[in-house]
Image: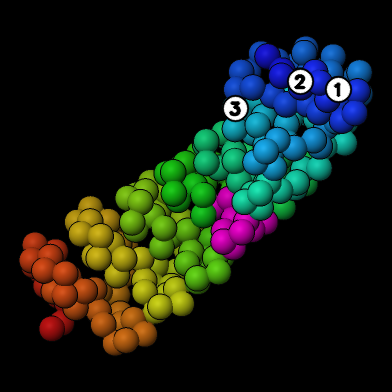
């Protein structure tokens, strides 16, 4: 249900939600008795962050209608939409977006909710975000896009969604590395096959002039090097 810190209720009246989906009535009771909608826990998370994680559209509706800050950030500078992306909470994410959440808001590393879907292969939320205009090539503070992340998290389904919605398959990060380059370095045959099949430039070079094949050879990834050569990678 809803957890309230009784010792602080007379001072702060914080509202915190446990990971249960049937707590709207308790939440309504606390809100009606002056619970602080935007109070934060030790991680800087509000009730809205927690409701997004458990995919509770009903509680999000209650909180937003009572003035919850929809883009409030926790200690990692993540919003409720970031949390919904991590947990693949589609209904929560959709409600947040329709009520004005900044779809490309960035956390402390410069990553958006779309980046988070790539970490966790949250395909339903990824599809939702791009369909509502999320920038598929948005970069974090190291120049990495969501597609770069899929390369080393093996999030093939999210990668496919990104490419189908126009992500630049040969986009480079600050080191000049593409998604294919990263997949080769992670020795991921599945992701290398995927990127090549979608037209990735197999001979694209990083800032030091190295290709995916160079990286495979440097790390003694003999099978990966063989795969890249079979696709026409140049020595």
Q: Quadrant of residue 8?
A: top right
Q: Which residue was labeled with disc 3? A: 54
Query: Mark 2 Cα within 10 Å, few/some/many (few <14, many 20+)?
Result: some
Quadrant where the C terminus is found in the figure: bottom left
Nearer to the camera, 3 or 221 = 3
Left or right for 171, reference 49: left
Q: Quadrant of residue 51?
A: top right
- Checking the image for residue 199, the label placed there is none
Q: Nearer the viewer, mark 3 or mark 2?
A: 2
Q: Which residue was labeled with disc 1? A: 9
Is there a contact, CB below 8 Å, between mark 1 and mark 3?
Answer: no
Is there a contact, CB below 8 Å, between mark 3 and mark 2?
Answer: no
The answer for how far apart the CA atoms under marks 1 and 3 are is 24 Å
The secondary structure type at the circle numbered 1 is loop
Position of 139 relative to 235 (above/below)? above
- Residue 206: horizontal and vertical position, in percent? 34, 81
Residue 109 falls within the magenta-colored stretch: yes
Q: Residue at x 52, y 36 (%)?
A: 87
Q: Which residue was labeled with disc 2? A: 4
- Residue 27: horizontal and vertical position, in percent? 78, 18
Toward the front, the furthest residue is 7
- Residue 233: horizontal and vertical position, in percent? 17, 77
Quadrant where the N terminus is found in the figure: top right
The answer to whether residue 4 is visible is yes
- Residue 53: horizontal and vertical position, in percent? 59, 32
Q: Residue at x 13, y 74 (%)?
A: 217
Position of 223 relative to 175 (above/below)? above
The answer for how far apart the CA atoms under marks 3 and 2 are is 18 Å
């Amino acid at each position: 249900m809803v957890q309230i810190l009784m010792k602080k209720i007379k001072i702060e009246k914080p509202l915190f939600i446990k990971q249960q989906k049937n707590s709207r009535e308790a939440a309504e009771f606390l809100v009606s008795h002056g619970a602080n909608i935007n109070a934060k826990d030790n991680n800087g998370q509000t009730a809205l962050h927690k409701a997004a994680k458990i995919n509770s559209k009903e509680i999000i509706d209650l909180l937003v209608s009572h003035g919850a800050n929809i883009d409030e950030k926790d200690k990692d500078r993540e919003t409720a939409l970031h949390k919904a992306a991590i947990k693949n909470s589609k209904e929560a994410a959709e409600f947040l977006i329709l009520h004005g959440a900044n779809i490309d808001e960035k956390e402390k590393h410069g990553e958006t909710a779309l980046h988070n879907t790539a970490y966790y292969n949250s395909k339903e939320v990824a599809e939702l975000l791009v369909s509502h205009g999320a920038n598929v090539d948005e970069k974090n503070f190291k120049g990495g896009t969501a597609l770069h992340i899929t390369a080393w998290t093996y999030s093939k389904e999210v990668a496919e969604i990104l490419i189908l919605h126009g992500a630049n398959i040969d986009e480079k990060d600050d080191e000049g590395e593409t998604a294919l380059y990263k997949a080769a370095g992670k020795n991921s045959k599945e992701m290398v096959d995927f990127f090549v099949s979608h037209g990735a430039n197999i001979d694209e070079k990083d800032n030091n002039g190295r290709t995916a094949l160079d990286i495979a050879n440097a790390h003694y990834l003999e099978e990966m090097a063989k795969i890249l050569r079979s696709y026409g990678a140049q020595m």
